[in-house]
């Protein structure tokens, strides 16, 4: 729904002098810091990244004034200095961020300067990846709608970020789900040096979305305080009454370069630079206050002098504030997990009927959903009638827990994971499980959000923890070929801030999933899909089984060789070890790692010290596969115990082909493992 007519709630003549003075004070405070910021870089004090807000003050003042910290959530972007000042950040909080002090309320100097936030007030800490926080805004709005919370989410960004696919996904999802979001597009005509005409065919970027149902579009002059205030008031009123999203497109000017690393005189001529300076929102607002006799020159000068004195005092406090402690770098990498006290070693002795892995995962999901009513799951194709995903892992869940807690997501992996990040922001008791993609190989579009979610806790200095479990059906041995049989853990374990687990048996799948869902922080739960219904992976599964992170499991004791493995190849290793022991009499130990990050280094070292010889097996490629990390760790920490070099066995350095003949040639199997065991024993 397109609407350019804005109700005139605010006007220079109708607004109280007290309010106008407050607004002018906020704008001058923002402009003063905006002008001072580059000097800190020149003096090597800090503010090494600064994206000027000059030219955006009208809409930024309006966003901050519209935001209610008690009911709303604000997602600013890196140019939103005035927005955050208007929303309540003090001069001290601005400089602490600008020169990256430990007292910075956004994250203690862990994030780039000019990324202002105050999580305590629901002013969210967002990253430098332009526009990606639109997904988080949509997820937070989903939570607000789910919990009948009366408020709005304000998401701010520049016009060029609308070229990003995840911005489209966020607006599409918000309109489809009818979410209470105001997407504010601050249009200054440039993406760094790229003019808008190179970004989109529409002169006004918001008009790219005119065909979206349940979406209202409001255009305003972002250089004008009153037009911007009226637009934001209209947008908030609409969202609260209709619970549907609004785009506010604010036409701005960028008076200075994109940032302090940009030189706009290289691509803007004098005519344009003079034009944008003439339309300075601060100068315009000042002229209006004088023209309509709301203030005298002396009154405005007094406010300006007060702000200069305030900024000068904040400058002194900023320089005296403590820097981050270098010894703190390992603080807040990932939250402490749920403590698995019932089964501290992740081992049980329970006999009983065997359950297949798919059954164990399904039953554990249902049990955790019954335990915690604030648990949710979504993904592609997971909740259509009796179907529960392409492998039926979530079968019956929507029927029991309803469409509000179990629902299908668009075929948009970024949206799936990004909204999980956003929804968990609303309340720390929320637990989100997502099927990040139908197959692990299709997860790559979500990698940007995976990287983002991995450093949320660290970046915010522990103020926000995304409590999300990402389930992915992984690996081969199904004749799936490209995008259906590749292994991805070698890439996905390289990110601090994410736990990565990879079970081989039904009981471990249940126990690790239970611990993952109950834990704070992010867990990547890789499921070997070839084992979903495999009898070899079936076990008895205690109903309360828990497996702690970072605990390997010795599946077979041995004296002569240690085999470290996980996932599909665990069963091949057990088979090969049994055959070789039977044929040759050597005793082979098989250790199921099951937790890749954190890794159980103690169990690995204990086994190596006992046997002196090592084989690391996984179905991923040998080159840069996860086994390289295991082998390197053993070489570093247990070299004196080795009777030979650690050997790795995995897939060939090729994609996994579709034809079963090709797949067999590429992936490890029992015969290849047997041959490797023989060579190591005879070394």
Image (cartoon, rainbow, N blue to C red):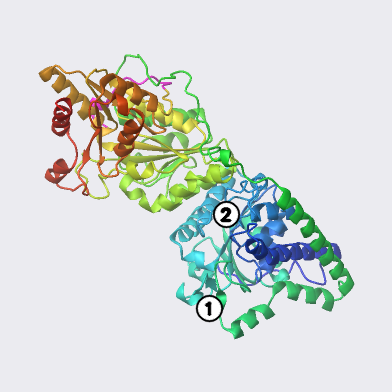
Question: Which residue is denoted by mark 2 in the rendering?
Answer: 112
Residue 297 location, x and y as percent? Answer: 87, 74
Residue 650 location, x and y as percent? Answer: 22, 38
Residue 534 higher or lower than 116, as above or below: above
Direction from residue 102 to residue 194 in the image, left or right: left
Secondary structure beneath dot 2 equals loop
Residue 81 location, x and y as percent? Answer: 66, 60
Residue at coordinates 46% horizontally, 58% vertically from top-left? 166
The furthest residue to the bottom = 271
Quarter occupied by residue 406 = top left
Secondary structure beneath dot 1 equals helix
Who is closer to the viewer here, 412 or 615?
Answer: 615
What span is colored magenta in the figure? 533-545
Who is closer to the viewer here, 47 or 60?
Answer: 47
Residue at coordinates 37% horizontally, 41% vertically from top-left? 385
Q: CA distance from mark 1 to mark 2?
A: 26 Å
Direction from residue 580 to residue 566 in the image, left or right: right
The quarter of the image holding the N terminus is bottom right
Residue 197 higher or lower than 525, as above or below: below
**Label 2 crowd bin: few (<14), some (14–19), many (20+), radius 10 Å:** many
Quarter occupied by residue 359 = top left
Question: Which residue is denoted by mark 1 in the rendering?
Answer: 266
Who is closer to the viewer here, 236 or 126?
Answer: 126
The quarter of the image holding the C terminus is top left
């Amino acid at each position: 729904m397109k609407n350019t007519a804005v109700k005139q709630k605010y006007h220079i003549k109708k607004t109280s002098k007290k309010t106008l003075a407050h607004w002018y004070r906020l704008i001058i405070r923002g402009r003063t810091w905006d002008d001072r910021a580059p000097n800190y870089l020149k003096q090597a004090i800090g503010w090494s990244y600064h994206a000027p807000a000059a030219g955006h003050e009208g809409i930024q003042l309006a966003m901050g004034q519209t935001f209610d910290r008690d009911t709303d959530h604000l997602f600013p972007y890196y140019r939103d200095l005035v927005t955050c000042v208007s929303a309540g950040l003090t001069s001290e909080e601005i400089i602490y961020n600008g020169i990256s002090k430990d007292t910075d309320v956004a994250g203690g100097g862990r994030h780039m300067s000019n990324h202002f936030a105050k999580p305590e007030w629901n002013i969210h800490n967002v990253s430098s990846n332009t526009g990606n926080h639109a997904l988080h805004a949509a997820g937070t709005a989903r939570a607000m709608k789910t919990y009948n919370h009366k408020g709005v989410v304000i998401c701010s960004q520049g016009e060029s970020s609308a070229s990003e696919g995840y911005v489209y996904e966020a607006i599409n999802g918000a309109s489809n789900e009818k979410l209470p979001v105001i997407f504010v597009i601050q249009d200054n005509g440039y993406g760094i040096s790229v003019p808008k005409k190179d970004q989109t065919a529409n002169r006004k970027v918001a008009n790219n979305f005119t065909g979206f149902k349940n979406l209202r579009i409001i255009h305003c002059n972002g250089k004008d305080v009153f037009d911007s205030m009226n637009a934001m008031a209209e947008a908030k009123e609409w969202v609260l009454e209709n619970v549907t999203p609004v785009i506010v497109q604010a036409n701005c000017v960028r008076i200075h370069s994109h940032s302090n690393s940009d030189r706009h005189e290289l691509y803007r001529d004098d005519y344009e630079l003079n034009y944008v300076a003439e339309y300075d929102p601060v100068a315009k607002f000042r002229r209006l206050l004088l023209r309509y006799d709301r203030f005298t020159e002396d009154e405005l000068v007094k406010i300006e002098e007060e702000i200069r004195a305030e900024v000068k005092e904040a400058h002194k406090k900023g320089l005296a504030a403590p820097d981050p402690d270098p010894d703190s770098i390992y603080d807040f990498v990932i939250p402490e997990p749920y403590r698995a006290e019932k089964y501290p070693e992740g081992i049980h002795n329970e006999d009983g009927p065997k359950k297949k892995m798919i059954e164990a995962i399904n039953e554990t999901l249902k049990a955790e959903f019954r335990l915690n009513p604030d648990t949710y799951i979504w993904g592609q194709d997971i909740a259509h009638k009796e179907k529960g995903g392409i492998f039926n892992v979530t079968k019956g869940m929507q029927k029991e827990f309803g469409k509000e807690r179990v629902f299908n997501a668009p075929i948009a992996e970024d949206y799936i994971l990004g909204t999980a990040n956003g929804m968990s922001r609303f309340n720390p008791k929320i637990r989100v499980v997502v099927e990040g993609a139908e197959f692990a190989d299709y997860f790559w579009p979500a990698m940007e959000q995976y990287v983002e979610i991995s450093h949320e806790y660290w970046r915010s200095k522990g103020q926000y923890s995304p409590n999300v479990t990402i389930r992915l059906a992984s690996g081969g041995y199904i004749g799936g070929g490209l995008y259906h049989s590749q292994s991805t853990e070698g890439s996905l374990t390289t990110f601090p801030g994410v736990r990565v687990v990879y079970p081989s048996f039904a009981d471990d799948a249940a126990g690790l999933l239970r611990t993952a869902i109950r834990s704070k922080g992010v867990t990547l739960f890789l499921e070997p899909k070839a084992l979903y219904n495999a009898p070899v992976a079936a076990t008895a599964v205690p109903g309360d089984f828990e497996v702690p992170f970072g605990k390997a499991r010795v599946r077979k004791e041995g004296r002569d060789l240690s085999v470290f493995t996980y996932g599909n190849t665990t069963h091949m290793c057990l088979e090969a070890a049994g055959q070789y022991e039977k044929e040759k009499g050597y005793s082979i130990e098989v250790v199921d790692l099951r937790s890749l990050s954190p890794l159980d280094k103690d169990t690995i070292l204990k086994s190596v010290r006992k046997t002196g010889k090592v084989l690391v097996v996984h179905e991923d490629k040998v080159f840069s596969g996860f086994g390289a990390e295991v082998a390197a760790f053993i070489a570093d920490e247990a070299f004196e115990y080795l009777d030979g070099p650690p050997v790795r066995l995995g897939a060939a350095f090729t994609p996994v082909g579709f034809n079963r003949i090709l797949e067999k040639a590429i992936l490890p199997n029992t015969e290849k493992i047997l041959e490797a065991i023989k060579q190591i024993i005879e070394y």
